[in-house]
Image (cartoon, rainbow, N blue to C red):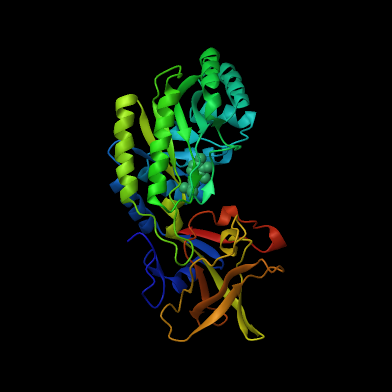
Amino acid sequence: MDQFDTTHDELRVGGLPLSLLAERVGQTPFYAYDRSLIAARVAGVRQVLPQGVLLHYAIKANPMPALVGFMRPLVDGMDVASAGELKLALDAGADPQTIGFAGPGKRDAELRQAVAAGVLLHVESARELEALAASAQALGRPARVALRINPDFELRGAGMHMGGGPKPFGIDAEQVPAMLRAMARDGLAFEGFHIYPGSQNLRGNVIAESLHRSVELVQRLAHDAPAPVRYVNLGGGWGIPYVAGERRLELPPVADALAQVQAALGRALPEAQMVLELGRYLVGEAGIYVARVIDRKVSRGQVFLVTDGGMHQHLAASGNFGQVIRRNYPVVIGNRLQAAERESATVVGPLCTPLDVLAERMELAVAQPGDLVVVLQSGAYGATASPQAFLGHPPCAEVLV
Ligand SMILES: *Cc1c(COP(=O)(O)O)cnc(C)c1O
């Protein structure tokens, strides 16, 4: 099982009934992440990865230190997007050889830290190359470089586009040959390419197409490479369903495409190691956000459950993290899953803004103050992707169970 089971009377997290876990945590709101669900999900991904394709964890999806430590032996490497995440990965014991550092706007000091650590830099601009050459010289250590490419194609159907057309991410594919020549001149240690076309993709055929087109592009660009291509990071972008009616990603087309592109890559670039980097797909469904009902009000016929948690701790569930139209995440009353008495209720937080909504007119078990509202699918882009200082409420807790 790699997602929460909602068929009991009370939700269980890591084998504990939710209300007991809340007592153990000693406060609400909190996020809880279930180790066994994470491990099961990683095992499921391994089943569709061809032998020899490496799996990395993108820390930004959930950087809780204990979770990163738990993930470390389960995956083959970590992807970081700041010096702070680099520290997390190293503290968790990740081998610097297996850490990739991507992201626009890497500061000179961060680049220097990364060279000192010996991690692979996913370079996103000409300026970064220059700064890296300077750091490598100052430290007397090679700067390990992969070029992040902004591909010359865009994926239809990806939830969030990160490549194709004008983008702040990566180097436009047409500029890559000139960059490769500059690298040869500056003595940087070229290792390969990174392509990340988009995130939150729920369609297996779109991911399959992305893999095929990315590998074609890598093969074209490899002609100008100053050294054999040893590293090909094809991104990931596997999505999870967040709202009712969204279909789960179907893995068979992805598995087929992975096997095909790995074979093609093996023929064209025999030294290349293929890497996938996944964030939300590994941890998103293994986490919940739990808030306690403080008040129950009826306003002109509509039931409002006012909780101690809200958008300041779970921006995405409130619909304010990039969503165009607000749609409800899956929400349940975690200590009354099977209650017969149900009603339409709107769950709001304690903030003085109409944006602070966790669920709008949802069919829920009838709840009273003290009951526990649970937002499912909350293991990624939660606590650290929310404006927790807004309105001065206390921070939420996070536990790995
Ligand atoms: C954000 C990001 C990821 C992780 O994205 P998910 O949608 O959580 O899988 C992976 N790689 C890069 C380069 C990213 O920016």
**Is 348 on the left or on the right of 79, as rendered?**
right
Q: Quadrant of residue 317?
A: bottom right
Which quarter of the rendering shows the N terminus? bottom left
In the depicted view, which residue is nearer to us: 276 or 266? Answer: 266
Q: Hey, which quadrant is residue 267 in on the image?
A: top left
Q: How many circles with numbers are drawn on the protein?
A: 0
Q: Position of residue 174 (x, y in %)?
A: 54, 26
- From the top left corner, tell me how far across and down residue 44 is, in percent: 32, 52
Residue drawn 46% across the image and 16% down it: 226
Where residue 294 appears, as percent x and y from the top left, is: 61, 77
Q: Give the answer, above or below, for where 376 lies relative to 343.
A: above
Residue name at image x 54 percent, y 42 percent: 162
- Can residue 56 be seen at all in this image of the molecule? no
Inspect this view and state whether residue 277 appears: yes
Expressed as whole percent of the image width and height from the top left, the position of residue 68 reads 46, 47
Q: Quadrant of residue 368?
A: bottom right
Above or below for 73 versus 29: above
